[in-house]
Amino acid sequence: MLKIKEESLISEKRPHESGEKHVSGRAYYTDDIPEQPGTLFGAIGWSKKANAIIKKINLDKVVKSEGVISVITAKDIPGRNDVGPVYDGDPIFTTKPEYFGAPLFAVAATTTELARKAVLKAKISYKSLKPIISIKDALKKKSYVLKEKIIKKGEALEAIKNSVNRLKGHFTTGSQEHFALEGHVAFVIPQEDKDFKVFSSTQHPSETQQIISKMLNQKSNTITVETRRIGGGFGGKETQSFIFAAICTLLAKKTKRPVKLRMDRDDDIIITGKRHDFYSEYEVGFDELGVIKGLKLKLASRCGISPDLSGAINDRALLHIDNAYYLENVLIENYLCKTNTASNTAFRGFGGNQGMMAIENIIDHIASSLKKDSAEIRRRNFYQKKKKNITHYNMKIEDNIIQEIFDQLIKTSSYKSRQLDIKKFNSENRYLKKGIAITPVKFGISFTTWHLNQAGALVHIYCNDGSVHVNTGAIEMGQGTYTKIAQLAANELGLPFSKVKVSATRTDKVPNTSASAASSTTDLNGAATINAISKIKKNLASFVKRKYKVKDGEAIYENGLVKFKGKSFKFNSLIKEAYLNRVSLSSSGFYATPKINFDKKKFTGRPFLYFCYGAAVTEVIIDTLTGENKILRTDILHDAGKAINPAIEMGQIEGGFVQGAGWLTMEEVNWKSNGEISTHSPSTYKIPAVSDMPEKFNAEIFKKGKNIENVINKSKTTGEPPLMNAMSVFFAIKNAIASTVNYNINPKLDAPATPEKILMSIKNLKNKI
Amino acid sequence: MTSSNIDFVYQNQIFKIKNPDSNEILLNYIRTKLKKIGSKNGCSEGGCGACTVVLGELKNNEINYKAINSCITFLPTLQGKQLILVEDLISKEGSLHPVQKAMVNYHGSQCGICTPGFVMSLFSMFKRNSKFKDNEIKDSIAGNLCRCTGYQPIIKAAKSLKNKNKFDHFSKNKKSTINLLKKINNKSIVIYNEGKKYFAPRYILELKKILKKNTNSELLSGGTDLSLIVTKERKDINSIIYMNSISELSYIKNNKKYIDIGASTPLIELESYIQKYYPDFTKILKRYGSPQIRNVATVAGNIATASPIGDCLPLLLALNAKVVLQGLKKTKILFLDDFFISYRKTKLKKGQFIHSIRIPLFRNNTFKAYKVSKRFDDDISSVCAAFNLEIVKNKVQSVRIAYGGMAAVAKRAIYCEKLLLNSLVTDEIIHKAKKALEKDFQPISDMRASKLYRIEVAKNLLEKFFAEIKQKKLIGIYA
């Protein structure tokens, strides 16, 4: 059980623990680990057809290509030829490629360049089959990766029928490429026996270990995976890194030499899955005030060729279909579409944001039909504190602060007066139009898969200088988890930050870890660290009590001192003394999230320990001649509980927003009708650049925030939820479009709101008048 | 003097590479031979900025610090320059450079992989401008992508540098660096390495001799397009002639009738020169690509690759530019109109090179240009349009209109022009002119935009042009 003392809560802005190394090029990423002599370099050959049977594959020229040492195919795999995390369906090498980019073989050569040249020399003949690419196609053909789901609460159809107002519509949110600036990379060094040391840019070392051991038919204890840091993850390295680590290990096994496999950016994007795009059809009944009475929804997602994490992602979409709104009667059908595209996967928000966009679009539609300010309709539908506080999956919401955040932000952002200014601007400008919107966020924290909510840690205190070594299952991917865990450890021990070192995450130090995902990395691993420290403290206390006969009561660790009742020690001397008296100064720690309990089949229970809240007001301007758009101003008020490191949380809040804005505006993944992806490089796939951040950007942490649950430092995570503040961008754009018809018609706009979609939306509106 | 060795200045010493592989990419050399791992590989196409390094180039006895993408730079082009990597910003005593310190203090790094690139872009700005404005900050990092921060902390870090003392160890060593650069700045390069040839002549005369014997060579300027043959198509280029060592080809001047631009003048120089003649030209050039690209890319390169989009091309067409081609003996001057044949094909023959470009000065005309793309920074146009009209008493006296992204080559809108010429500008004629564009262009759909959108935008840009004239103001979200 995690013990939290109010007086020991911290809130300390501090630069990222690797900041100085980042800026001077001294931080090692997987590709930067010094290569031993004899290291080989890999490349992957992949399918040029989206759905086919390989009739013949001739690799003679690949084998003979300059610098090539070895070529591997499915035949070289002794064990499981699959990297699927939960279900099978993601072959390492296939002979029946189901998507454009499916790996077929790999080579190891003396340089990366030669390996990449070699794979192009394969002669492959395919028998092409017709691919299914779009969600609509898949629905029509009933092509699914998992069974459909139906969620029911109350009597939705009845409620809709009895409502005074009813609306119908459909809505799409787009896919999104993770585009971590560090692409996929692995580096594998064969060890004695048949062991392998695997360096992988992954969010999930433990599962990398398991997948490799299954592939090789070897015990898990023969594989060690290490990750010091990754150059961005965003969900893209939760499972999608496995195939590269696996292939790299296989190459190392075959050649008996160290092998590095660093993916070319285009290959990386072509081979790996992305965010699920979602298509929804809705029918909603509501009263004259805009309060939703009944909702019928069909929610379908593009999953690609396999289940991967699609089940959990769709579950999270279903669990967030309410966002911050009380839904009394719902009926949801959920379809997980199988398409001949790379298997879509985790991406910051993990389906939650897709579910939330669906309901926000419905709310916006209701507001438009009632000719009311959408902020008002949102407010009227909010969950309340004493009543209307049970979700559609029967969880009672106990920490609801959305109303406070929303109302405070409306004031601080001058939402109402700016609305008037905008209307004035729009009436005076023929071609340029402005729009504004406020959207709320409520996001549930915990893995919806119950057993994943656990973490381990390992803490050592060294006797000669009292320095502290911490190791956990957390992956540092930019979110600052190493910094925050070190802060927590330093605080627990009353030491300066500089005395604590968090070291590279390794499967032989802390086993059976969960992915750094679901925003819960620091919550889980920080708590496990505190647990380990508390065990060492216990050892110290019993030693001091034994030797010095001090009274009972807990010691206070602060400013390098350890104070027992009536006796005080310098931390260093106590540690040394304890060592000389044969006291253990090392401990593992463990944490399992309490309270959660969710029945996935019945879709009922408490999937989340707590909720994060936030809201954003965004003002945009659009050019009605071209559809170009720009964020003029964004105000965010976001709940981080009692933030451990407000500077790092702010980084997540701002960065998440811009990433979300990219998802909803310019980022567009494009497939040709034959299934070939055509957006696979920074020249064809655009993530936000510096000019895309809001011209004015006021982000703030909700000052009164404090986690009511027993979470480290009473903090709340900021990993995923801030991304959803970007929903305000989309609805501000929609608001600007609506102004072209004097807000009389609800514009049809799907995400992403690219210039093209915006222009076409305006055109369609004008045709309706 | 010719040599097969490359000399460059690194850490204030002369570094020599004997007979390098002409296809070797600078980033690869930095990471695998120099064993410096600070510069990162994010895309191998100059699209993300993680590989940004700074080159010090001698100009008028000063060092010009240029940020470039090392992932698309051929190693031999380092000849005669100073190479500065992110590791080199740290002082001898081990303290961080002011730019690095600011990035730490303002939380400018999260995952940190893009950070070295940002540091180098900001360093180049820091060294070049004594007082930079906010928009210069944005421009300086427009070619650096960050997926974590949302850019705000990086902007704050950059702003904090405004009043910082600019004296650093590069300033301290400036004299000796300049002397070293002078020492190595005086030779032409000829490399034969395993069947691959590389030439970097310093004079036109030399260039012609080389061209005569090596007609099948690729002419290399900024290399921002050419290098992708190696990094993306994974092919070798067997013979390269590097144009940018020829100082005779690097100039901009004007004779009151036209602006004359030498072939190897980088776009970044044209962009500031042309501002007072055609401000919209500057506006489009700033969005042509990132500073890393514009620091090395040239107008001649843009013309020679004849991309269907090629942001300069519609502007040059609308301005009725001429291109001066030199062969071994003859010089030919062509209107740009006559230069393009089809998709990526031009009239440039083997043995010929582009010597210069001439942009006429229209004193009585209205020249406007527009670029529409998904992203403002460093994106390829969906549609780019340029209008060059003389309107007297509401009557169109002369008209040249050209579009990029609307056909296999950048192209004039002939039907539209015909309709407008000698017409009075009325809503009706604008409407007809818009309609005429449907005759002029049958664009394609691709990942950037559909044909429907392209034609719609093309029409609307024409409307915008006239609306701006009428309202006497710029209409646009970036205006």
Image: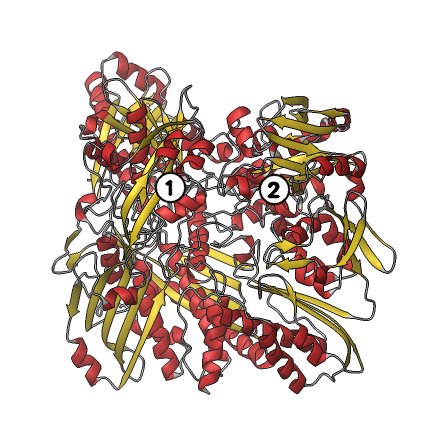
Does residue B103 show up? no
Q: Which amino acid type is marked by label 1? A: Ile
User: Camera-side residue: A371 or A706?
Assistant: A371
Q: At x 20% / y 26%, what residue is drawn?
A: A221
Tell me the subunit letter for badge 2: B
Which colouring convention does the figure follow? secondary structure
Badge 1 vs badge 2, beta-carbon distance below 8 Å: no
Q: Residues within 10 Å of mark 2 (few under 14, many from 20)?
A: many
Q: Quadrant of residue A300?
A: bottom left
- Rendered view: A457 above or below B311: above
- Give the number of the disc on residue B121: 2
Residue at the farthest top position: A580
Q: Secondary structure at mark 2?
A: helix
User: Camera-side residue: A564 or A708?
Assistant: A708
User: Camera-side residue: B405 or A186?
Assistant: B405
User: Camera-side residue: B118 or A367?
Assistant: B118
In the image: residue B275, left or right of residue A253: right
Does residue A144 show up? yes
Q: At x 68% / y 36%, what residue is drawn?
A: B214
Q: At x 64% / y 24%, what residue is drawn?
A: B11
Q: Which amino acid type is marked by label 2? A: Ser
Residue A592 x %, y %: 19, 41
Residue located beneath label 1 in the image: A10
Kindly indicate whether the residues beneath marks 1 and 2 are on one polypeptide chain. Answer: no
In the image: residue A635, left or right of residue A486: right
Tell me the subunit letter for badge 1: A
Q: At x 30% / y 57%, what residue is drawn?
A: A351
Residue at the farthest right position: B255
